[in-house]
Image (cartoon, rainbow, N blue to C red):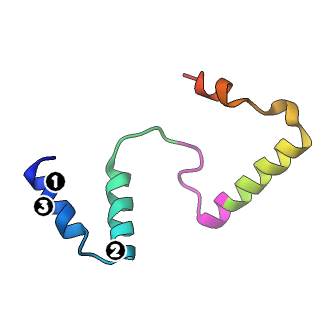
Amino acid sequence: MSTAVSDLLTAAMKLGESERNELAERIWDTLDGPEFPTDDLTEAEFEREILRRREEALNDPSSLMTWEQVRALP
C-alpha cells in the first residue's frame, strides 16, 4: 500500500460510519465497470424490478440458470 493510500485510509477511518459509507460509494462510482440496466433506477424502482424478476422466476423456473452457467458467461 502506498503512503498516499495509507494516509487516506487513516483519515477515512476517523470518519463516522455513514461518512465512510458515502466516501466508499463515491469512490466506487468513479471506477470503470460494466453498466447494468438497473444502474439508473431509484431504490423504489429497483425494488419493483427485483420483485418482478422474483415473480418471473417463480412462474417459470425453466428460465433460471445454475451458478455454473452464470460463471461461464462471458
Residue contact at pointers 1 and 3, CB within 8 angstroms: yes
- The residue type indicated by label 3 comes to Asp
Residue located beneath label 1 in the image: 5
Residue 65's spot in the image, x, y percent? 74, 30
Q: Which residues are magenta?
A: 36-46
Q: Circle 2 sits in a helix, a strand or a loop, which is it? A: helix
Residue located beneath label 2 in the image: 19
Residue contact at pointers 2 and 3, CB within 8 angstroms: no
- The residue type indicated by label 2 comes to Glu
Where on the picture, by quarter, is residue 11?
A: bottom left
Q: Residue at x 84, y 50 (%)?
A: 55
Asked whether, in this view, residue 51 is left or right of residue 43, the answer is right
Report the Cα–Cα distance between label 2 and label 1: 18 Å
Q: Which mark is residue 7?
A: 3
Q: Earlier in the sequence, mark 2 or mark 3?
A: 3
Front-most of residues 19 and 45? 19
Q: Is residue 53 magenta?
A: no
Q: Nearer the viewer, mark 2 or mark 3?
A: 3
Front-most of residues 30 and 70? 70
Task: Assess disc 2: are there few (<14), some (14-19) or many (≥20) residues with their C-alpha within 10 Å of its C-alpha.
Answer: few
Report the Cα–Cα distance between label 1 and label 3: 5 Å
- The residue type indicated by label 1 comes to Val
